[in-house]
Image (cartoon, helix red, strand yellow):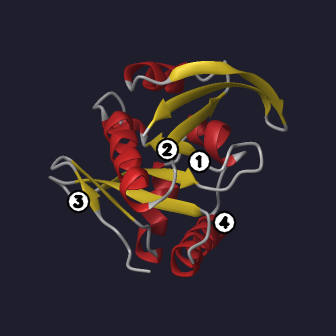
């Protein structure tokens, strides 16, 4: 499978490579560790994550993980992911997740990443709905869901705790 690059002229999404591991680890803060990673990452866990993400791309696995890069500087500014096969979702739905490094928050990067992920899903997969599962305490991600036009569809109790669910047609 050819590795995609998606851009809107300001933000570039492309699969993470091992050369990005140190920047990925350095960008993680407590919020990302809490909401995305289930705890603080290590150099070894980031290397495994990138290795597994690339394996998913090569084998056509269900996870599509992208590094998020600032076009003007080339800096890694976060990550975004679409999971195409979660048992808790319908076959036409993908779970999206995203994280933006602290110094880049408030610049619309998460919103831009979601738009590009939805465009990718619509053109490259059978996915027709993007789903966000967000803790009620994750106020920043709740604001992203609202800005991007996601609609609330309920809540669920998950291993990570209570989650609010939102959906957007791709």
Residue 49 pos. (x, y %): 61, 67
Q: Residue 122 at x, y = what percent? A: 40, 51
**Sequence-first disc among 3 and 1:** 3
Task: Kindly identify which residue carries mark 2.
Answer: 128
Foreground: disc 4 or disc 2: 2
Residue corresponding to mark 1: 92
Which element type, helix, strand or loop, lies under badge 4?
A: helix
Which residue: 48% across, 31% down? 168
Query: Which comes before the other along the chain, label 1 or label 2?
Result: 1
Which of discs 3 and 2 lies nearer the camera? The answer is 2
Q: Quadrant of the N terminus?
A: bottom left
Q: Residues within 10 Å of mark 4 (few under 14, many from 20)?
A: few
- Of tags 1 and 4, the one toward the viewer is 1
Mark 4 to mark 3: distance in Å?
24 Å
Q: Which residue is mark 3?
A: 74
Depth order, front residue of 108/46? 108
Instruction: Give neighbour class at mark 3: few <14, some 14-19, many 20+ (Cα, 10 Å).
Output: few
Task: Pick whichever of labels 3 and 2 is earlier in the sequence.
Answer: 3
Name the residue located 57 percent from the left edge and 36 percent from the top edge. Answer: 131
- Mark with earlier residue (4, 2): 4
Q: How many marks?
A: 4
Q: Quadrant of residue 158?
A: top right
Q: Which residue is mark 4?
A: 45
């Amino acid at each position: 499978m050819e590795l995609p690059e998606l851009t809107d002229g300001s933000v570039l999404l492309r699969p993470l490579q091992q050369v990005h591991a140190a920047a990925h680890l350095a960008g993680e803060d407590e919020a990302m560790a809490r909401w995305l990673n289930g705890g603080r990452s290590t150099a070894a866990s980031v290397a495994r994550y990138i290795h597994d993400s690339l394996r998913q791309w090569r084998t056509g696995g269900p996870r599509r993980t992208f590094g998020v890069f600032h076009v003007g500087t080339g800096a890694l500014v976060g990550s975004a992911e679409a999971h195409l096969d979660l048992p808790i979702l319908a076959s036409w739905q993908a779970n999206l997740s995203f994280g933006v490094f602290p110094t880049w928050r408030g610049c619309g990067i998460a919103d831009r990443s979601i738009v590009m992920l939805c465009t990718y899903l619509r053109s490259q997969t059978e996915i027709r709905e993007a789903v966000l599962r967000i803790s009620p305490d994750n106020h920043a991600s709740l604001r992203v869901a609202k800005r991007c036009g996601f609609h609330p569809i309920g809540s669920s109790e998950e291993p990570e705790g209570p989650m609010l669910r939102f959906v957007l047609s791709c």
